[in-house]
Amino acid sequence: MLLLGTFVSGQADHISDINCLKSISESLEDPYDNLKSWSFSSSSICNFLGVVCWNEFQNDVFSLDLSYLGLNGKFPRGVGNCTRLTALDLSNNNLSGHLPSDIEEILQFVTFLDLSSNNFSGEIPPGIADCVYLNGLRLENNQLTGQIPWQLGRLTRIKIFSVAHNLLSGPVPDFVNLNVTSDCYKNNTGLCGEPLKPCKELQVWKIFPETESPFRYAFGVGFEFSVLSVLVFLFSYSAGLVYFGRKGSKEREYVAYSKLTNVKHLQQASNKIPVLESLVTRMNFEELSVAANNFSKNNIIGMGKMGAVYKATVSNGNWFLAIKRIPNSQNFDHEFFSEVMALGRLKHPNIVRLLGFSSKDKEKLLVYKYEPNGSLYERLHSMKGETQTMEWPVRVKIAVGLARGLAWLHHNHYLPTAHLNVSSKCILLNPKFEPKLSNFTGAIFFNANNTKVAKSKTCELGHMKKDVYSFGVVLLELITGKKPSETNDSRNPERTSDVCYDLDEVVDKSLIWKEFDGEIIQLLRIACDCVQPLPDERPTMVQVYKTLRAMGEKYGLSDDSQTSTLLIFEMDPWRLQVK
């Protein structure tokens, strides 16, 4: 537990983390200006694009995801100044040059490293093997040459490994705890050894350095494995609770999703858990139970269809989790797999973070980042007196954030998704009242490069327009302060739209006469457009977000998320196309 305490509660040099991001932004070419949203004049870096902090109140970088941004340049050595970084994803950019020979010094505590789909060249540095906490290493789709360092086989925690589509040659490593398939070495014609074709001649002096004979290596492995076992045990509580994103080339991802989005097929598969492990970390059930006080009733913070949600405390009480316990998971297999498949891939500032899952006997656990302000529904309706304290700028912030998240969810090029269950109950609020969309148990996923007939595309757009309607209902809640049952009739949308014509009666009395009337009317007009009875008459979420973003800018709500890239797109009836 010692290392966990160091990671969670230790006082990091936060200036170092700010300098880390400054160095990265200065060292990389950013042709699409994605990193211009990194405003170092602000007090916090935790809302920067791609940045996740250990604690939202401290500038202490936990993970960094700069994938798919079109970045140019060399490997950013300045990332080493993020001293507690655990995950780095630079995949699908145009980075080039050699990987640092001292990479183990730059990324001392990294648990997941994704450099795939770039133009890196040269040899793989043997020092990567000294990144002893690595769970995932992805180097595919580059121009790497030479042999794969045999030392990589000593990475005892490794679960994900790929060097496919490079120019590598020679024997492949013999991993201690990983069964590597041939796909992980695909399109490296010079590689040999299990699981590939046998090497013609096993020349020991080519595999081991001149200074390290096979006997000396075997002795070293035995000694180092003993030491690593102690370190792994100490670190397991921390690294076991780490979220690891994983992306590869677009082509491979579309193939993966064609398999994963068929829930029925997945449920019939004989080996489901490893599939889920490829998306999100599997955690230790007993340790999660202890963190949640053995699932005491006193720790319950919410109830849902699948089961109760518990607040869990990690280490010395400075880090909290929300754990959804599903006692009889067989009844909710579809919902469980949908949630993991969605949140295991969909990463956005306005979507709740799934940190991991666990499974024991018939029970399953879903582990999320804890959001202390609860749901929007609770803030508006369940907490006596709290509605009065939710001022208009806060409501605008929630509306803008939710629109931003749904616009990205519907139209991202990665995995377009219809949520189909949007409501104030599934909108969680972080300490800064930024909305986080949760509950993806009924979500539907679509092929990002869809070439199906128009009928299928019409169905896709129809599902998304259902989300637009639900978003309009949430806007009405924000404006009226009333429960959906008082303003919404899903069986008769015309009754819902009738609210739009009775302004004096519907607006929350706490908002009247505070110089916000013009904005309230504007937001009400957007809500009424969204709840039109006919789906074809409703706007898209991108159109809604464009309108709301202008209102949000008045309150300093700049867009530093991936959604900003949507605004350089032009939408045809079915898909966003690059101008």
Image (cartoon, rainbow, N blue to C red):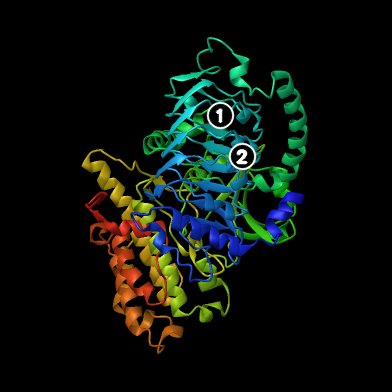
Return the residue at label 2.
134
Q: Position of residue 362 (x, y in %)?
A: 64, 38
Tell me if 502 is positioned left or right of 230 in this view.
left
Tell me if 550 is positioned left or right of 382 in this view.
left
Q: Nearer the viewer, mark 1 or mark 2?
A: 2
Q: Secondary structure at mark 2?
A: loop
Q: Nearer the viewer, residue 352 or 210?
A: 210
Q: Nearer the viewer, residue 53 or 41?
A: 41
Mark 1 surroundings within 10 Å by alpha-carbon count, few (fewer than 14), some (14 through 19), many (20 or more)? few
Tell me if 521 is positioned left or right of 345 in this view.
left
How many marks the image carries: the answer is 2
Rendered view: 409 above or below 159: below
Which residue reaches farthest bottom? 513
On residue 271, the disc is: 1
Rendered view: 548 above or below 246: below
Which residue is found at the position 58% from the left and 49% from the top?
355
Q: Quadrant of residue 514?
A: bottom left
- Amino acid carrying label 1: it is Asn
Mark 1 or mark 2, earlier in chain: 2
Q: Nearer the viewer, residue 279 or 480?
A: 279
Q: Position of residue 407 (x, y in %)?
A: 36, 58
Do the residues under discs 1 and 2 have CB atoms within 8 angstroms? no
Q: Secondary structure at mark 1?
A: loop
Q: Is residue 439 visible?
A: yes
Q: Is residue 295 visible?
A: no
- Amino acid carrying label 2: it is Leu
